[in-house]
Image (tube, rainbow, N blue to C red):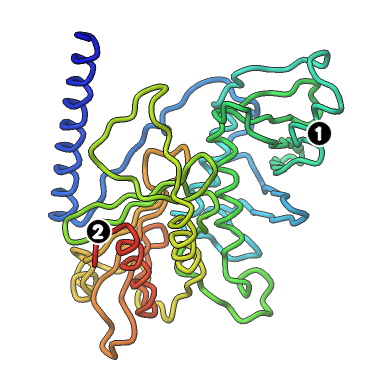
Amino acid sequence: MATSTVGGRLAKLAGFAAAAMMLAVLGGISFTGRWPTDATLEHLTGDGIIALPAEQVAHVDIVASGKTVRLDHTGGGWAIGGAMLDPGIAKHIDTAIRFLNVSSPRRSLQPGEYDAAKIAEFRLDPPKLLVSLVARDGKTSSIAFGEPTPAENSQFVHLLGQPTIALLSRYVGVEWQMALDLAERVPAAAVNGKERPKLLFLPMSFATIWAVEIVQNGALTRFERDPAGDWFHHLPGHVHTPGGFVHKADPSVAPLLAAEFTALERASVEAVVAKHPDEATLAADGLEHPSAIMMMYARDSLGAVARVEFGNPTPDGFGRYARVRETDNLVSVPRYVAAHLDRLLEIAGVRS
């Protein structure tokens, strides 16, 4: 009984500490308009499964669902179809390559530990995702990404030409999926020069996003996916412990949240007001201290992979000024885009 009481007190203290920390963070956001960065995964060191560094890669081919995307490495960064990618987007490609350089397999399966049936079960032939790094000397290193392990902390991968199957930390494959998602959302005209460009508001879809935070009126509301991938409102005031409570989305609410996120990822930009706006321009359009901020997190990311800010209404009243930090463009979007955030908060019951 005493142990249980002490454990409960410790959990409450941890909860109070976490709440105090979040209040401090919110205070910082309100004052500076900026969200703190996290570099936990920026200092990984180790022996990865591919030694080729990003600066020696000429281009990358990513194959998934029968489609191939080619990313060319130029002196100024990364490009697709001749169109340069924004630095905030291109960094995901560099990060994905670096993860291959420094992430050691958790375990390797030797040929006697698997057979053809297991290869199919691991979804390595054909793979869910095939990444090929082509070096400047023409040599190619290809890695197939398959299913996650039952514990969902690793993923089955196969370096083509090697006899072993490796269990690699899941965040490596997630980063490559994100790189593919970002590349596929580049305007079509930039890729083939024929179709009318449609500039999507968000640089990525919600396919690889596992948590979303909305900051509005000094309050933070967090949405997450449960183990099945369904969305739910993550209520504050409790502490997660190993072997503890696992969230399960409400089946009547999850589709409503998913619909709003889907609408957001399909939203397009009406106009690019300024590329790399200065502080005076941001202040004039209400983005020095944004009225609403949305942060998007990948499943294994502690830091936000995208930060979206909303400012003042446009003069005609039909739009809203906004900024996505990863592209660093000041844009105008239809008014209903910001309304999706309001709707998410209404569904969560934190706004009437």
- Looking at the rendered image, the disc whose residue lies closer to the viewer, 2 or 1, is 2
In-image side of 3 versus 260 (left or right): left
Depth check: give the residue in front, 43 or 224.
224
- Residue 46, position as x, y percentages in the image: 52, 20
Distance between the alpha carbons at the discs numbered 2 and 1 = 46 Å
Depth check: give the residue in front, 267 or 260.
260
Residue in view at x 59 percent, y 44 percent: 176
User: Where is residue 32, by image quadrant?
Assistant: bottom left
Q: Amino acid at mark 1?
A: Ala
- Image: 139 above or below 34: above
User: Where is residue 162, by image quadrant?
Assistant: top right
User: Where is residue 187, by image quadrant?
Assistant: bottom right
In-image side of 296 versus 192 (left or right): left
- Residue 30, position as x, y percentages in the image: 15, 55
Disc on res. 350: 2
State the SS at label 1.
helix
Dot 2 crowding, Cα within 10 Å, few <14, some 14–19, many 20+: few
Q: Pick the quarter of the image with the N terminus.
A: top left
In-image side of 93 versus 138 (left or right): left
In-image side of 99 versus 302 (left or right): right
In this view, which residue lies farthest toward the front? 1
- Image: 126 above or below 184: above
Disc on res. 120: 1
Residue in view at x 30 percent, y 64 percent: 346
